[in-house]
Image (cartoon, rainbow, N blue to C red):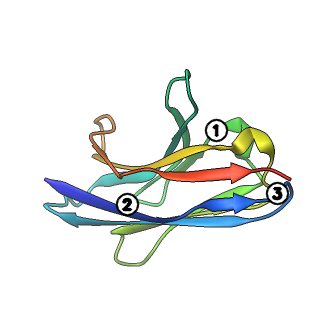
Amino acid sequence: QVQLVESGGGLVEPGGSLSLSCSASGSIPGDNVMGWYRQTPGKEREMVAIKTSGAWTKYVDSVKGRFTISRESGWNTVYLQMNSLQPEDTAVYYCTFYAIGGAPQYWGQGTQVTVSS
């Protein structure tokens, strides 16, 4: 079992910045993926950014150049720096964790990000 605890999020005006963090604890496999998905009402959960323990990263096209995912040297915490936020970035953001080669298995509690003037 892996437990994920998120922090960050909140309300920001368009063009502003926010950061999210997520810490994992429990039985953590060495080769893993941590990252962020987001979801708005009536829509499927969407991958935003993921980063493997080997430092490979992937972003959804809509956030490339604006969001940056990083992991601390111990690899059990993942961050998402979100710049130039737009109203369409408004969503509940979920941290995820899974073993490489698998699919998202563990989820954080979700944190609301609202971009509005």
Name the one closer to the observer, 73 or 63: 63
Disc 1 from disc 3: Cα separation:
15 Å
Q: Is residue 104 above or below residue 82?
A: above
Q: Residue 60 shows which numbered tag?
A: 1
Left or right side of 60 for 117: right
Under mark 1, the amino acid is: Val
Which residue is rendered at x = 56% and y = 28% of the image?
A: 41
Determine the secondary structure under disc 1: loop
Q: Secondary structure at mark 2?
A: loop
Which residue is painted at 56% across and 51% down in the image? Answer: 112
Which residue is disc 2 drawn over? 53
Q: Which mark is residue 77?
A: none
Give the residue type at disc 2: Ser
Compared to 77, does 100 lie above or below? above
- Residue ID at (80%, 47%): 86
Res 58 quadrant in image: top right
Percent position of residue 72, x then y = 44, 75
Give the CA separation, mark 3 to mark 2.
27 Å
Q: CA distance from mark 1 to mark 2?
A: 19 Å
Residue 14 falls in image quadrant = bottom right
Instruction: Indicate the position of residue 43 as horizontal and vertical percent values.
Output: 56, 23
Disc nearest the viewer among 1 and 3: 3
Task: Give the crowd class for mark 3: few <14, some 14-19, many >=20 residues within 10 Å.
Answer: some
Check disc 3 and report the residue beneath it. 84
Q: Is residue 103 left or right of residue 78?
A: left
Amino acid of disc 3 = Ser
